[in-house]
Image: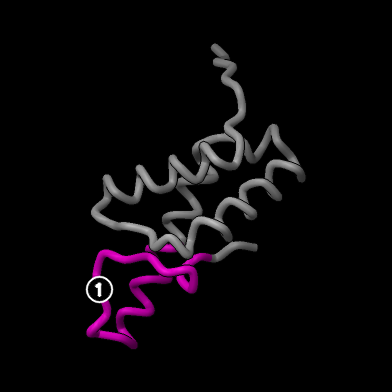
Amino acid sequence: NKIESPDYPGAELLAITKLTAKGKGYKLTQDCDGPLLAFYDCKQAENAAENGNGRLARNTLEKAIFNQSRRLVAEPAAELDVILPSDLELQ
């Protein structure tokens, strides 16, 4: 069986990322919105068929959480539930 679903635009991928982060106990700062939206829009322009699904949002968030954990080792006083733009790996 194959299930067809429409691709999500960048704004919806951003919303999915925020919702997923909240569900995992994290929050993204507002400073993350612009870079994430630009990243998702760029990925969509490159290959919408591959980059318009929730997997892109989930993978992007998982990388950010990993990078955030590494940052917390160097900054023990930092908030444990906050994802900063520097935690994003947007390549």
Residue 31, compared with residue 39, is above or below; it is below
- The structure residue drawn at horizontal position 56% and vertical position 35%, both measured from the top left corner, is 53
Q: Tell me where residue 15 appears, x and y as whole percent.
A: 45, 41
Most distant residue in the bottom direction: 74
Q: Is residue 87 magenta?
A: yes
Q: Quadrant of the N terminus?
A: top right
The answer to whether 41 is drawn above or below residue 88 in the figure is above
Give the image location of residue 79, x and y in percent: 25, 73
Q: Residue at x 61, y 35 (%)?
A: 9
Q: Is residue 47 magenta?
A: no
The one nearer the camera, 20 or 9, is 9
- At horizontal 76% and vertical 45% (from top left) the residue drawn is 46
Direction from residue 7 to residue 46 in the image, left or right: right
- Sort mark 1 into few (<14), some (14-19) or many (20+) by Cα contacts within 10 Å: few
Q: Is residue 51 left or right of residue 15?
A: right
Q: What percent of the width, then of the height, locates residue 75?
A: 31, 86
Residue pictured at 74% horizontal, 40% vertical: 47
Compared across the picture, whether 49 is left or right of 25 comes to right
Type of amino acid at the residue the image marks with label 1: Glu
Question: Which residue carries the number 1 mark?
Answer: 79
Q: Secondary structure at mark 1?
A: loop
Residue 85 lies, in percent from the top left, at 48, 68
Residue 25 vs residue 31, the one in the foreground: 31
Q: Which residues are magenta?
A: 64-88
